[in-house]
Image (cartoon, rainbow, N blue to C red):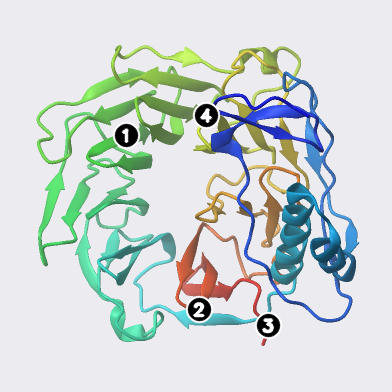
């Protein structure tokens, strides 16, 4: 019998200890009758250090067998795996979707949804600098009357990001005179605009509580910007990256930047403007590719998306490790900078839009099975996505041109 160690749990199937913070949640049991099939993944077991990449490829699995396993097994991990398989199967068979043509002036570039005091708020940003919302959604979440143009940050410059934390909403735009919109959602009409000298062409942003990180592009910047307090905003800190910053993320005291030259840097907010390069050994034998998206997972992992189509998870405890712990197979990209990517609120499933105008899905960890949420081919590239918990269940939001799709995950028409 494995020993009980503080802060760790024993995974009998993988024969090793893991941090309690990374212990997978058991999905709610889902009833299902009759045998069904769906696409899934294979995961190779890694050693004590993450030296082997688990490539999540798709294969077929019987939902009937998974249901029987969840009913008969006496092992908690087996029940979790079976329930996860059933959930993947239902996600793969999603066919219920609501499509709304939003009255925007340009193409939808950014989307964000949040819930505050029981009210759902939706935000949109378009390719011509217009920001739409926020507006409470008392009835239907896709009522066209809920969308209205609130302000224009920069004419003919796209809204590059919309980020919400608590009761604050920050929107940024790409352009030579970029402005930052800060809204207090608790006070109707309370919006202020920020602008800083030599801060322009904002490609990415991430708001956490009152601190904001900006990633700057367009050649001459080669830096990220950190604002410790957006309510005061009297001073900013420059983070030297040596390359345009396509993606940023912050978690507690750490800031992560993904650059055009493929570098990933980690900055400590308590130290200064110079960061630590992560996973540098990976590029000794591999060509670098621009980092389009990154974010932390389960406190000890880093999810990254690259322009060459790599979709990877790294272990932040071993920052010199050359091999990612998971590589999500099937994602397609060769040159497109803006592709939607989203995680469910429990960080169990990953969804990514591809250059082939499809959306694919994978489980994050690999103890469960992979799935494809639906087989829709969009008319163009999906540039922004988000997974939300709605009263009717989990929903995947995806925007393409002037259309906003709400896919009700696991539900069929």
Mark 3 burial class by Cα count in 10 Å: few <14, some 14-19, many 20+: few
Left or right of residue 255, residue 298 in this image: right
Which quadrant of the rendered structure holds the N terminus? top right
Instruction: Identify the residue position indicated by label 3 in the image.
Output: 412
Using the numbered discs, state the Cα–Cα distance from disc 1 to disc 2 in whole angstroms. Answer: 34 Å
Q: Is residue 221 visible?
A: no
The answer to whether residue 180 is visible is: yes
Could you tell me residue 406's position as x and y percent?
52, 74
- Which one is closest to the eye, mark 4 or mark 3? 3
Q: Residues within 10 Å of mark 2 (few under 14, many from 20)?
A: few
Real-space Cα distance between discs 3 and 1?
A: 40 Å
**Circle number at residue 213:** 1
Q: CA distance from mark 3 to mark 2?
A: 13 Å
User: Which is more N-terminal, label 1 or label 4?
Assistant: 1
Q: Is residue 165 left or right of residue 38?
A: left
The answer to whether mark 1 and mark 2 are in CB contact below 8 A is no
Q: Say which element carries label 2.
A: loop
Foreground disc of the pair 3, 1: 3
Instruction: Residue at 64% x, 55% y: name it.
Output: 26
Tell me the residue that label 4 is attached to. 260
In the rendered image, which residue does mark 2 sit on? 392
In front: label 4 or label 2? 2
């Amino acid at each position: 019998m494995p020993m009980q160690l503080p802060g760790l749990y024993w995974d009998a199937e993988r024969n090793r200890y893991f941090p309690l913070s990374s212990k997978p949640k058991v999905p709610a049991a889902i009833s299902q009758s009759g045998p069904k099939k769906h696409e899934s993944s294979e995961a190779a077991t890694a050693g004590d250090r993450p030296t082997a990449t688990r490539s999540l490829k798709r294969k077929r699995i019987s939902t009937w067998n998974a249901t029987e396993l969840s009913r008969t097994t006496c092992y908690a991990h087996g029940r979790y795996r079976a329930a996860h398989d059933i959930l993947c199967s239902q996600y793969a068979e999603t066919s219920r979707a609501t499509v709304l043509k939003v009255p925007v002036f340009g193409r939808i570039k950014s989307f964000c949804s949040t819930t505050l005091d029981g009210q759902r708020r939706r935000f949109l940003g378009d390719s011509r600098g217009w920001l739409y919302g926020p507006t409470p959604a008392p009835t239907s979440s896709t009522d066209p009357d809920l969308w209205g143009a609130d302000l224009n940050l920069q004419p003919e410059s796209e809204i590059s990001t919309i980020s919400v934390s608590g009761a604050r909403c920050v929107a940024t735009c790409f352009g030579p005179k970029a402005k930052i919109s800060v809204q207090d959602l608790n006070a109707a009409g309370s919006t202020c605009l920020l602008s800083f000298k030599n801060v322009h062409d904002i490609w990415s942003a991430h708001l956490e509580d009152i601190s904001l990180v900006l990633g700057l592009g367009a050649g001459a910047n080669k830096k990220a910007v950190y604002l410790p307090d957006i309510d005061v905003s009297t001073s900013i800190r420059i983070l030297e990256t040596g390359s345009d910053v396509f993606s940023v993320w912050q978690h507690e005291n750490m800031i992560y930047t993904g650059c055009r030259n493929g570098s990933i840097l980690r900055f400590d907010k308590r130290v200064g403007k110079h960061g630590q390069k992560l996973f540098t050994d990976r590029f000794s034998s591999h060509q670098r590719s621009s980092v389009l998206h990154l974010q932390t997972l389960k406190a000890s992992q880093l999810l990254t998306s690259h322009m060459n189509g790599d979709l990877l998870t790294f272990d932040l405890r071993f920052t010199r490790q050359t091999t990612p712990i998971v590589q999500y197979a099937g994602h397609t990209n060769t040159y497109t900078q803006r592709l939607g990517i989203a995680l469910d609120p429990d960080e169990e499933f990953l969804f990514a839009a591809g250059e082939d105008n499809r959306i694919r899905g994978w489980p994050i960890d690999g103890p469960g099975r992979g799935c494809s949420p639906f087989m829709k081919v969009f008319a163009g590239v999906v540039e922004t996505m988000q997974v939300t918990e709605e009263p009717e269940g989990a929903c995947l939001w995806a925007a393409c041109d002037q259309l906003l799709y709400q896919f009700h995950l696991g539900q069929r028409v």
